[in-house]
Structures are given as C-alpha cells and as structure tokens.
Image (cartoon, rainbow, N blue to C red):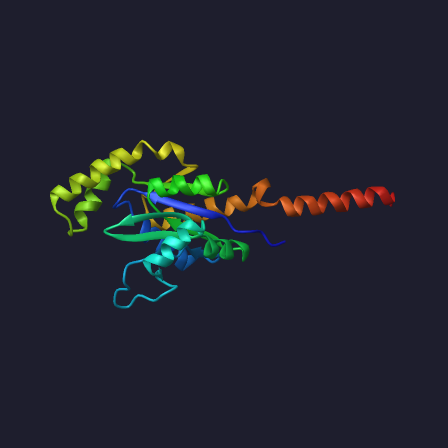
C-alpha cells in the first residue's frame, strides 16, 4: 500500500538548531524530500538550479503568484522567495515526506492552503540555552543577539497555533523524535482513506457472496 507523503512545516527560533537537526535527519533516515524554494535573486557561487533554489526571473515569479502556483511567498532584500506548489505535490505523490523550513507567518499561510500540513515548532530547552547558542556562534554582536532574543519572545506567542512542538536538547535525540513524529502521521485515518475504502469494498463484496 503506497501512502502519500505528508507536508511538514518546521519553524523555530534563530539559533535553535533547525539546520543541524535536519542535516542529521536526512543523513540517517530515508523517505524525505526538502522543499526547494523559488527565488528571483541571482545564484551564488556553487549554487545549482533545482537543488538549492529554482532561480527564476521577476516576471516569471509574478506570473507564478497570479496563477496560484505558490504555496506561500515573501520578499526579502528586494527579491522574491516562495514555495512552488507543483514540486511539493510531485514529491508528496511519490510518497516522500516533504519538509519545508519556514518562518511563522509563512507557516500559517501554508496551513490555510494545505489544511493537512503538519506544523512543528522546534524549541530550545530554555531561554538561557538559546542565548548561549547564539553567543556560541561567534558571528553576531550582542546587539544582534538581543534582537534575536526579542524576536524569539514575539514568535513564542504563535507557537500555540502549531500542531506539535519538539525540543532540541540533543541533536541526535531531536532528529530521532522528529522522525518518529513524522512517521506517525502515516498512521492517521485521513492519510489512509484510499486503503480504508478499498478494504470496505472488499468486505462488502465478500459478505454479499456469503462465503
């Protein structure tokens, strides 16, 4: 029985470790696809079209908006970024669980368009640990870190609108828990309606035969 994949939307505070956890998940588990975004910015050295991003013109992106070809989109530093619907649907139909790493507003917009999407918010074990992780990067000033902590406090208010939370206390454990949570979605009734209908029909046919 082939089960259609689930669309997983993962959000989390800056510095919580989303990228590291996803890297571990993809290295240790199979059956996942990472959602590739479309953008109007120019490719950077080493970036490959269709792997890192779908690089398109501004005209083409705006055409995608008009034709409702995007699950969500936003502008950042003068460029468009968005999630192509066709790519996600193709991977889901192939049975992959598609993971989209995105911020809160985009995640809630996805939920409106795809009610079956699973929204997961990754949290740190505590505020102090998040602060230490941000400082541990060694790439940001105290002022930037303070802004990120304030943004985290603002985003925390929206966590209640998600379906699940997952705490990143240990990368391997967090990746394993994320995998278990996503795989459990395949056991939902609404994920298995074709199988249930098929079984119901077979049971009815056999009962009518009286054998």
Q: Residue at x 54, y 46 (%)?
A: 186
Q: Residue furthest left?
A: 142
Residue 120 showing in the rendered view: no
Residue 59 showing in the rendered view: yes
Residue 140 versus residue 45 in the image, above or below: above
Locate residue 80 relative to residue 77 in the image: left or right: right
Nearer to us in this view, 5 or 187: 5
Q: Quadrant of residue 28?
A: bottom left
Q: Residue 122 location in percent, x, y?
A: 35, 42
Nearer to us in this view, 55 or 146: 55
Q: Residue at x 39, y 57 (%)?
A: 36
Q: Quadrant of residue 167?
A: top left
Locate residue 142 relative to residue 188 in the image: left or right: left
Q: Quadrant of residue 154?
A: top left
Q: Residue 205 location in percent, x, y?
A: 81, 45
Q: Residue 35 location in percent, x, y?
A: 41, 55
Nearer to us in this view, 202 or 30: 202
Residue 1 versus residue 43 in the image, above or below: above
Q: Residue at x 12, y 42 (%)?
A: 143
Q: Residue 27 location in percent, x, y?
A: 39, 59
Q: Residue furthest right?
A: 210
Q: Residue at x 27, y 36 (%)?
A: 126
Report the number of discs.
0
Quadrant in the picture for the C terminus:
top right
Residue 14 versus residue 2 in the image, above or below: above
């Amino acid at each position: 029985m082939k089960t259609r994949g689930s669309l997983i939307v993962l959000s989390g505070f800056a510095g919580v470790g989303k990228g590291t956890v996803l890297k571990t998940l993809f290295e240790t588990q199979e059956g996942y696809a990472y959602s590739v975004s479309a953008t109007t910015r120019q490719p950077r050295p080493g970036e490959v079209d269709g792997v890192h991003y779908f690089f398109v013109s501004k005209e083409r992106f705006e055409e995608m908006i008009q034709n409702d070809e995007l699950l969500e989109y936003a502008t950042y530093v003068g460029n468009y970024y968005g999630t192509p619907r066709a790519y996600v649907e193709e991977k889901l139909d192939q049975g992959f669980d598609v993971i989209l790493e995105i911020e809160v507003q985009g995640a809630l917009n996805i939920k409106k368009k795809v009610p079956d999407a699973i929204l997961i918010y990754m949290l740190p074990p505590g505020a102090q640990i998040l602060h230490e992780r941000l400082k541990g990067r060694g790439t940001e000033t105290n002022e930037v870190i303070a802004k990120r902590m304030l943004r985290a406090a603002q985003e925390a208010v929206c966590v209640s609108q998600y379906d699940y939370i997952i705490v990143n206390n240990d990368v391997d454990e967090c990746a394993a828990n994320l995998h278990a949570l996503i795989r459990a979605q395949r056991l939902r009734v609404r994920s298995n309606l074709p199988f249930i209908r098929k079984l119901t029909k077979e049971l009815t046919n056999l009962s009518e035969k009286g054998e």
